[in-house]
Amino acid sequence: MTDNQQVPFGSGMFQGQAKFVDYAHMNQQEVQVNTLDEPVTDTLLRDINMILYKLSYVIIPRMKETQGRKLRNWDLWGPLLLSLLLAMTLGINSNQSSDTIFGTIFIIMWGGSAVITVNAKLLGGQVSFFQSVCVLGYCVFPINIAAVLITFFQSYFGFFLRIIIVGVAFLWSTFSSLSFMSSMMNEEKKVISVYPIFLFYMFLSWFCIFI
Amino acid sequence: MLDNLNQDVSILQPSLQMTDSQVQNRIRQMKMEDPDEQTCYQKFCNLFTIEYYREYFDVTTELVIAKVVNAFNPFSGTFFDIGGGIPELYGPFWILNTLIFTIALSVNIIKYMQLQPGEHFEYQFEIVPFLAIFMYLKTLIVPMIYRVALKCVSQDRLTLLHCFTIYGYSAVVMIPISLLNSIPNPAIQWMLLVYVLFAQTSFLTSNFNQELKYLPKEKKYMIVGLVAVVQITIMILYKFYFFSSFNYQQLGLVKKRMNTHILQHILGAN
């Protein structure tokens, strides 16, 4: 019987599909062996489900603040995959400086997320560091889609169509992260904590247009 | 309408009350000075906590917008009256980053417009790290020069942080100008450059003037002259490094030559 529930294993919690086991009648040893015994596909699928679950929150931006709470189980696999994908797709088309592009995008993504989070903390927000980095990383997903479209279907898109696609992706990303970030800050500091996010996504979006 | 009036006045009047985080900081300072209360961590590692720096980021949206709008006006000397003249680092830091972004963007737009019909456009990245280093160094060093000069004329009311704040906000004028700089007409580019020079210098001098009103004339002119000279130097560097058209090929060539040289060296070729 499969169940969507939060199941403790090892030292962490995860969400996703889990086989329902009767923990009351099982001892600690058996619980730990359970997850080691399972097939590798199960482990991978669990993590992939978690990533997809969070991505669904990005794709449908939820403006109500209570619904953004599910993103608080942070993980860094999603941002890592998305940043690698973005850096690779933007670096593919360049002849000479693909390594520079890869490095710049990777550093800007992680460094930018860190700087924005530290900024939010300095302005007095009660935001945990890794939650914020996780959310900012996941919200790059629309820009990823735009980059993949533009890179692989280059001949179909003229300059203005590119600007429209990238513009839509940029607005989508910003709205997705808005509900999470603005729920952390006071009313009077919302705009100044959201502006760096705007700048960050705009920087990443401009790369997509010119590549 | 009277409410709006009160609100406007309260932004402009220097406030004598301390804000929340300043009160907390004060309490913490008083606790810190009591040696029995301090742990070893508190004694030495306070520098690494976020709370130590919160004092410098004590701003609200209204305050930042009011300061930015004030910075666009080169003649009013009222910058230090906004929000009680409390120095902060939020504005300078993010204005600096926006500026780096817009200058990199406009350099690439200029290059895109100069493209020949058959060529594939290569986004020029190499300029971004250099630009970032130049901007950060400039924003760190120039306010120190100002502070030293103010100290020489024994003006102690403006601390180093005030100099950082006002210098950071004075760079706001460059943001729209650098975007407009991507227009290919050289006459327009020179006019924009002159305007930026004039606007930034007069903003800085009219604000420093408020503090220097009571000094004898030679000292005032010395400060004003120093501000103008530093600004002119920086503008000339901007123009001839970032916005001149012959530099793009040069940057490209330098990188290619470096690469082949290093490769030959590694492979032991002559």
Image (cartoon, coloured by chain):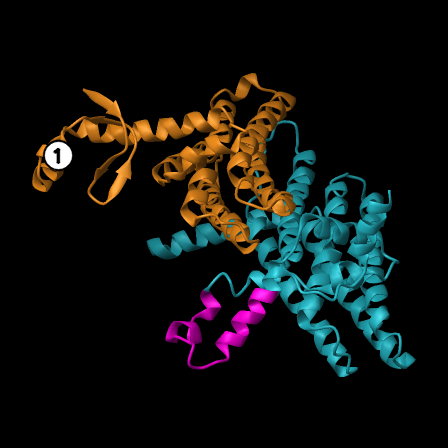
Identify the chain of the residue marked 1, using the numbered disc in the image: A
Q: Residue at x 42, y 28 (%)?
A: A55
Amino acid on which disc 1 is placed: Ala
Q: Is residue B233 above or below residue A211?
A: below
Image quarter of residue B194: bottom right
| Residue A2 x/y as whole percent | 21, 21
Q: Is residue A105 visible?
A: yes
B250 with respect to A118 (left or right): right
Image quarter of residue B149: bottom right
Find disc 1 in the rendering and name its residue.
Answer: A24
| Residue closest to the eye, A163 or A12 | A12
Instruction: Please tell me whether mark 1 sits on a helix, a strand or a loop.
Output: helix
| Residue A157 x/y as whole percent | 58, 19
| Residue A103 x/y as whole percent | 44, 45
Q: Which chain is cyan?
A: B
Q: Residue at x 20, y 27 (%)?
A: A42
Judged from this view, the residue extending furthest toward the right is: B217
Image quarter of residue B165: bottom right
Q: Residue at x 60, y 39 (%)?
A: A198
Q: Which chain is orange?
A: A
| Residue closest to the eye, B205 or A49 | A49
